[in-house]
Amino acid sequence: MQFFLHAVAWLLDPANYRPGLQTPLPIQDRIGEHLLYTFISVAIAALIALPLGLYIGHTGRGRSFVIAFSGSMRALPTLGLLGTLFVIIGMTVPFTQTAFIASIIAFVVLAIPSILAGAYSGVESVDPQTVDAARSVGMTELQILLKVEVPLSLPLIIGGIRASVLQVIATVVIASYISLGGLGAIISTGISLNDNDLILGGALLVTVLALVIDGLFALAQHLTRRGPEGQTRRRRTHVRALPLRRRAVTALSVDERDH
């Protein structure tokens, strides 16, 4: 308990936030670096995984291969991958850039599976009757994907991004082992100096940062969810009772009103 109180006191000390201090301080610089690495990694992973996941969810093609591939990517040890990339990239890239490039690639590989799974499972979860209704009124496959399936699957898509962000935030800490910044620099410095305040303080910062980001994504998921399940079920029952042509128009009007 005493170690915890000392770490909290270290975090609340204004002297640790004064600009111009030597690494691993000031604390706000390390937080900014941590968020920067996370944002770049997840953004690149989303550019790769989201289009692929939406395509798979809409067409059903390549699903088994992607599931197996993403599962193998999850099994990769990130620290081992980071070290391997650092050595390989260091042969062709200046040392000052090697750590950044190797870390971003490793974190992108870590982030892709969750985003990919959220995208294709979200699109697959859309009610087939809604998709059929969209086709019956003449919407193209791209319009169905962008105007029907993506809006309805947003909670699961955001959930996949949320999971990947939390994984990357927790893993960016290891980048300090190849001389990159972030909150891991505080922890690694504490380990080298045998300073428990830095070690526990850095760990608390990572935890709080992850909880704050997780809360923001949870709010985003809540705001993108549809209405109560009972209302959705009653609307679907009502739609089934209509003739085919009116059923299609009604189903689309319900979805557009919800979004």
Image: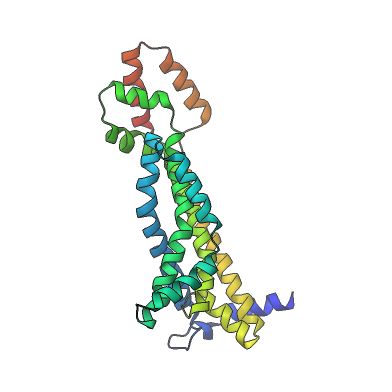
Residue drawn 45% across the image and 76% down it = 87
Front-most of residues 68 and 107: 68
* Quadrant (top left, top right, bottom left, bottom right) of the N terminus: bottom right
Decide if residue 223 is in sight here: no
Percent across and percent down for residue 60 are 41, 35
Residue drawn 52% across the image and 53% down it = 72
Residue drawn 47% across the image and 85% down it = 18
Percent across and percent down for residue 162 are 48, 53
Front-most of residues 25 and 143: 143
User: For this view, does 20 lie left or right of residue 147?
Assistant: right
Colouring method of the image: rainbow
Whether 248 is drawn above or below 154: the answer is: above
Percent across and percent down for residue 53 are 40, 44
Residue 241 placement: quadrant: top left
User: For this view, does 1 lie left or right of residue 92?
Assistant: right
Percent across and percent down for residue 204 are 60, 70
What count of labels does the image hold? Answer: 0
Whether 216 is drawn above or below 149: the answer is: below
Decide if residue 95 is in sight here: yes
Residue 199 placement: quadrant: bottom right
Front-most of residues 205 and 186: 186
* Quadrant (top left, top right, bottom left, bottom right) of the C terminus: top left
Residue drawn 44% across the image and 22% down it = 235
